[in-house]
Image: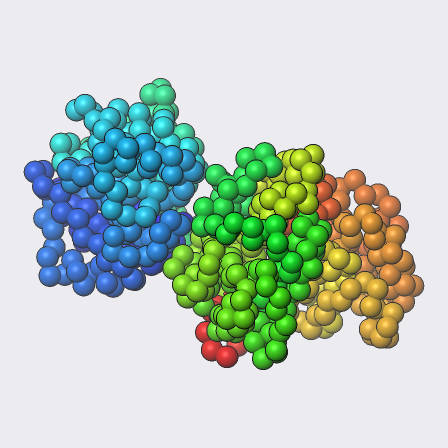
Amino acid sequence: MCGIMGYVGPRQASPILLQGLRRLEYRGYDSAGIAVSDGGNMTILKAAGKLDQLEAVVAGAEPPGNLGIGHTRWATHGPPTDLNAHPHTDSTDEFAVVHNGIIENFHQLKEELMAAGKTMVSDTDTEVLVHLISDEYEGDLAAAVRKAVARATGAYALVAVTVHEPDTLVAVRMISPLVVGIGDGEMYLASGIPALLDHTRQVVVLEDGEMVTINPGRVVLETLQGDPIDREPAEIDWDVEQAEKGGYPHFMLKEIFEQSQVAADCVLGRLDGSSVTLEDVEWPRGFVEELDKVWITACGTAFHAGLVGKELFEGLLRVPTEAVYAHELRYRDPILEPGSLTVALSQSGETADTLAAARLLQDRGSRLLAVTNVVGSALTHYADDVIYTRAGPEIAVASTKAYLAMLVSQYLLALDLGHRRGALDQARALEVGGALAKLPAQLEEVLKREDGVEDVAQLLAGHDDIYFIGRGLDYAVATEGSLKLKEISYLHSEAMPAGELKHGTLALITEGTPVVVVNTQQHVYDKTTSALQEVKARGAMVIGVAYDDDTEIEAYTDHLLRIPRTLDLLSPVLSIVPLQLLAYHVADHRGLDIDQPRNLAKSVTVE
Ligand code: F6R
């Protein structure tokens, strides 16, 4: 989720690059850099931190040149430092590359390049690309890029330049977005339309597997195999704010719709059949075999992801697991045996309570694994191991895609640990791995059903109290569905295990009270259905979240939000999506400030 900007034309490149990066800052903002070529030389300027830092560096020494590329980074490999900031160059400084996304086989490529005598100066996956391109260069940048990307696998967008071709930008799109802006005798390239709107409204959007060679007066679009593509420019009529939201009315909705890609990115290069590779996790010898307790700690939405984790670790590893709110845990006196693992979940990696609870357990001898979306965040400094969730910057205060990425990260972790401990036989591991790999396509399917959710949302928007119930993993999802609703719609909502209703809350269920039931877990299906009958008998309006092929539930529900069938173990990844959409549309009907709900902040760095 980094931002890329490129320019070639008669004007000085650097102010145009900086202006474009400013428009793309919403895509990533932990470091930035530009490369500008004046024909003979290329100047590279970079700075860790927000774009202001780079602007301060450029202000004193604006590099001359009419061609350039720029980048604002959201780190995926390596912390946000000057060295890891883009553009990256080869050892001769004659080639430069900016890149967004993940090169899946970069470890292997890095080893090959180092064995061939190359020196790598950064921790990034990008640096291998620029070395590959310079190695392949024989007087034609487009040909060199084509050969280099044939060796790389992953999901990415890149732009390359060289001093040898001072009016040429070459770019490739492999899943991550790239758009060419057509000017009058000048051309632009960006990872998002907002960066182009100050200059042009004529754009050519690249599709996956396409490559473009750009000169001031010419755009050549081809497949990676070299077949020409003829595509007319499109006219964009969005304003900048609409463009930042990708045409969605709110960041929250955009982020909900990114979740299929987020699930795919999270497993990219990490899951092969049933085998899992977690690049920043290194288990000490014997640790996994002797693991006898898992602690999960987090706050809010991240804690709800942890409730799913608890069921997973107990189910797949058969290791006792406790999920505890970080703000409770940090003031408790937890009893730790040797051989425990703490999984601290935090989108921001900066939540004060989560940091404190994680450190308390670590100080008492637990190994600490951080699951976070922010490379280099405070939590990662203390953690022994890290799983980056790769969801990209989450702008809406209400977390959606980061939650989903935490779920997927925990499935990977559970699969890895279960395998290593021998708690999972090969057939089960393959079944779970196979179902995980299918989730991105199934998420696409769920997202297509937004209209049905919107109809139900209309019915809920006028109610005051809404209940969410479920059992086991369905209960974990109910907690998050309820939180999403209350934080953005300001309606009162409660989640509880379905079996708990009759112990008190049933007294609140009267004619028309909305009750949302998540019912995907077959081993407790009938039990949850009994709870449904109890609320139905009191006149509740029941909204079910159920598998497509579950016809039985129709008798007990008034409205249904359907999801494709998956393993019951994985259903939270799918069943949360209609609930996120429900919360969104209820808040939208109520005309509320969805991206910035009252009294809340994105990152809670105080106690
Ligand atoms: C709700 C939400 C919060 C956060 C919580 C922890 O939508 O986003 O409940 O989940 O404040 O934040 P992180 O994950 O950054 O530790």
| Vertical arrangement, residue 477 with respect to residue 139, above or below | below
| Vertical arrangement, residue 30 with respect to residue 96, above or below | below
* Residue 96 visible in this rendered orientation of the protein: no
Residue nearest the observer in this picture, 473 or 172 = 473
Residue 78 location (% of width, % of height): 35, 52
For the point 61% across and 54% down, the residue is 290
| Vertical arrangement, residue 493 with respect to residue 158, above or below | below
Residue 587 location (% of width, % of height): 61, 65
Q: Tell whether 336 sits left or right of 396.
A: right
State the image quarter where residue 461 is shown.
Answer: bottom right
Residue 440 location (% of width, % of height): 58, 41
For the point 21% across and 26% down, the residue is 137
Residue nearest the observer in this picture, 72 or 472 = 472
State the image quarter where residue 469 is shown.
Answer: bottom right
* Residue 78 visible in this rendered orientation of the protein: yes
For the point 51% across and 58% down, the residue is 369
For the point 31% across and 26% down, the residue is 146
Q: Tell whether 603 sits left or right of 223.
A: right
